[in-house]
Amino acid sequence: MQWGSVAEFLAMGGYGLYVWPSFGVAALCMGGEVIAVWRRHAAASESHDES
């Protein structure tokens, strides 16, 4: 697919209202998962160091 402008690309053929928020939600979920794993790892390392 080719777009003539950035506005056409962002509109995604009329589906941009559904496409871009879904990308945003997916990015937030993946970022949240990274943070959750990082915090669990830090907590596990801390509890391992104490024993």
Image (cartoon, rainbow, N blue to C red):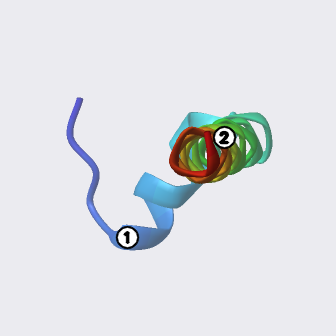
Q: Is residue 31 above or below residue 51?
A: below
Q: In which quarter of the image is the C terminus?
A: top right
The nearer-to-camera label among 2 and 1 is: 2
Asked which secondary structure carries label 1, the reply is helix
Image spot of residue 15 (x, y percent): 69, 34
Q: Residue at x 56, y 36 (%)?
A: 13
Query: Between 35 and 50, which is closer to the camera in this rendering?
Result: 50
Q: In which quarter of the image is the N terminus?
A: top left
Q: Which of the two labelled residues, at mark 2 and mark 1, occupies the earlier sequence position?
A: 1
Q: What residue type is labelled 2?
A: Arg
Image spot of residue 20 (x, y percent): 65, 48
Q: In this view, does 14 lie above or below 49?
A: above
User: Which residue matches tag 1?
Assistant: 6
Image spot of residue 29 (x, y percent): 71, 39
Q: Which residue is drawn at 79% across and 46% down?
A: 17
Count of picture labels: 2
Q: Which residue is drawn at 66% across and 44% down?
A: 47
Q: In this view, does 4 lie above or below 51?
A: below
Image spot of residue 12 (x, y percent): 53, 41
Query: Between 47 and 41, which is closer to the camera in this rendering?
Result: 47
Q: Residue at x 68, y 48 (%)?
A: 43
Position of residue 29 in the picture relative to residue 37 (left or right): right
User: Which residue matches tag 2?
Assistant: 40
The image quarter in which residue 40 lies: top right
